[in-house]
Every structure is written in structure tokens, then in C-alpha cells.
Image (spheres, rainbow, N blue to C red):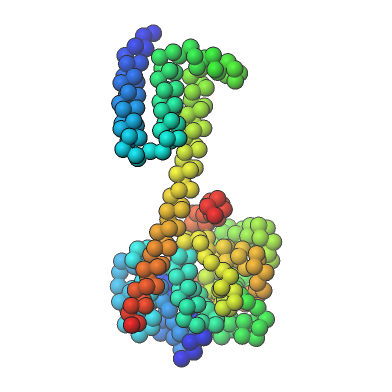
Amino acid sequence: MNYLPLQIIIGIFVLLVVFRLSKKFKEGGLKTSEFIGWLLIWIIALVAFWLPQSTSYLAGLFGIGRGVDLALYLAVLTLFYLIFRLYLKLDKQQKDLTKIVRHISLKDEDNRDN
Amino acid sequence: MNNQLTIIIPCFNEQETIAQVINGVKDFGRVAVVDDGSTDQSFERAQATGVKVLRHLINRGQGAALETGDRWALENGAETVVHFDSDGQHQAEEIPKLIEPIIKGEAEIVFGSRFLNKNHKMPWLKKWLILKPAVKFQNLLLGTNLSDTHNGFRAVSRRALEKIKITQDGMAHASEIVEQAVKANLKYVEVPVKIVYNDFGQGFGSGLKILRDLIFGKFNK
């Protein structure tokens, strides 16, 4: 089976993402650790698509039959983790929002009294 | 008017009942309505009764509204606070009975209980499928021995209010109050109350939501 078209598409996609990432990093929108983290993730994706055998090798180390399976497991785990983080962040923002609304509500009331 | 007793009524889109509820309780103490971002005429109708009305710019949930009311009450010299629903479920004439243990110095928090009242009628499906398991779960989790949960009719002393801070914006605040009371070693009692049911009670779905809020609430501290 010929994976070349897929590999090229993914390659272009990753290049675009990395380009945007480095632009954002230069503008100061990303911390160095964040930049490196994201860069690594996308480079790993690129390697996984261009050298599929490498994932099989890694999978073997973990006792998983196919490289694709390992990639899938990791992807699901990462997604769960990210969703969890997102949930916590959202929850915190909701609480902050309540604080602001409460503050305004109590302040408005003071003003009405005066 | 008795400023030391402050009755806090959180209100979200209750324009049909709010004025009647306020007029029913205002003889018992100072009333503070917290309009939780209602989109109907609740705020205007509450204001028309002449009581104090605080307003949330956007809807933040009953727990959030109660906490706003609590903070206001503390800042304005309340000695005892009563939480009262805006939908007409609670009976105003039961307020003196509810605050009695606090005034006598027997407790810092008084929870209204539907189950202590033997003659109390409630839909049995709701009772056995939702309320009873919720109470059991709460007792198990907190080591309490309460007969009821999530019935928003309660009285809190100033001393207790200074220690309790509601962070659960949604309906999970009821469990949170119990939890904080236990942690702060505040003395609590239950008093039988009568709840009049309307169609807007909480179903099984919102019970699950409360559970979720309680669990996730643990992570963000």
C-alpha cells in the first residue's frame, strides 16, 4: 500500500503548524517549555507517519503488537488528560466569574445606598 | 423590623411567585432577595415589594446567589440567616420554629427536614429513588446522621456563616454546607418542615449533576 499522499499531506500540515507555533513563540505568546512541548509532539507525529517502522519498534518494547495501536493508545490517554485539564480550567474560570458577578452585585448595592 | 434575622431568597425567573413569597416572609425579618440574572420580571417585582434586592448580572446558580446573600447579610449585621426558596415550596410560618435552636443557643445551623415530618406527603418515586439514596450517600461520605438533604430551607447563625463559604455555584451547595459544618465542628440540628411540591423539583438527572459537581469540586481547591 502506498502511504505517500497521506505522508505528504501530514507533512505539509505539520510544517504549517510548526510555522505558526514558531511565529507565536517569537511574538511571546508561548512559554519556552510550551513551545518545546508542542514542537516535540508534532515532530513525533511527523516521524510516526514517515517512518512507521519506528512506532512498531517502540510498540514492541511495550509489548503491543502494532505501532499504530501504540499511537492510538497514547493519543486516547493524552486526550483524556487534556479534557480533564480543560474541565478543571473551565471550572476555575466559572468560579472566578461568580466572584466577579458577586463583587459587582455587592458594590452596586452599596452605590444604591449612598 | 428585626434586622438581626435576615431571610435570603435566591431567585431565578420566578416572576409568578416572587412577590407573594417576599410578602409572606417579610414580617418575620429583614429580607434580601438575590436575583440571579433573571430574564423575566422577577427583579422588578421583587423591588416593588420594597425589600433589599441584590442582582447578579448573569445567572450563576443557586449556590452562588446564596453566597452573595450570605456575604451581604454578614456585612450588614445579621445575627441569624434563613435560606428560603423563591418558588413557594417553603412555609414562612415555619421560620420561627427553624431559628429557635439558634436563638436558644442549642445549634449553629438548623436544617429543615422533610423526613422528620411523618405526615409529609411526597411523590414516593422521588422519595425512594432520589432523596433517600442521596441522604444515605451524604451520610456515608460525611459521617453525618441527617434525615434529609438538598431541601434549601435552613437557618445559619452568624458564627457559622463566618466559617461557611459556599463555593459550589450549582445545587451541590446543599451538601457543601453540610460538609463545611462538619469540618468546622459546628453544631447542627434538624427540624421537621413541610415542603409544598410544584413541578420544578429536581429529577434524577440533576441529582447526577450534583454528584459530578461534588466530585470535581474536590480537584479545584
Task: Residue B102 in the image: state x and y as whole percent.
Answer: 62, 82
Rendered image quadrant of residue A113: bottom left
Q: Is residue A57 above or below residue B178?
A: above
- At x 69%, y 66%, the residue is B145
Viewer-closest of A100 and B52: A100
**Quarter of the image with the C terminus of chain B in it:** bottom right
Q: As drawn, which residue projects farthest toward the bottom?
A: B1
Q: Position of residue B143 (x, y in %)?
A: 69, 61
What residue is shown at x 42% (from left), y 62% (from top)? A98
Taking A34 as reference, is B83 above or below it? below
Indicate left or right for B124 with B200 as reference.
right
In the image, residue B179 sits, relative to residue B51, either above or below, namely: above
Q: From this view, report whether residue B216 is shown above or below residue B92.
A: above
In this view, the residue in front, B1 or B145, is B1
Residue that appears at 52% across and 70% down: B152
Give coordinates of residue B181: x percent, y percent. Answer: 62, 68
Q: Residue at x 50, y 38 (%)?
A: A81
Q: Nearer the viewer, residue A91 or B83?
A: A91
**Residue B63 is at least partly visible in this image:** yes
Residue B112 in sight here? no
Q: Farthest top residue? A: A1
Residue A58 placement: quadrant: top right
Q: Quadrant of residue B61?
A: bottom left
Q: Position of residue B175 (x, y in %)?
A: 57, 63
Q: How many marks?
A: 0
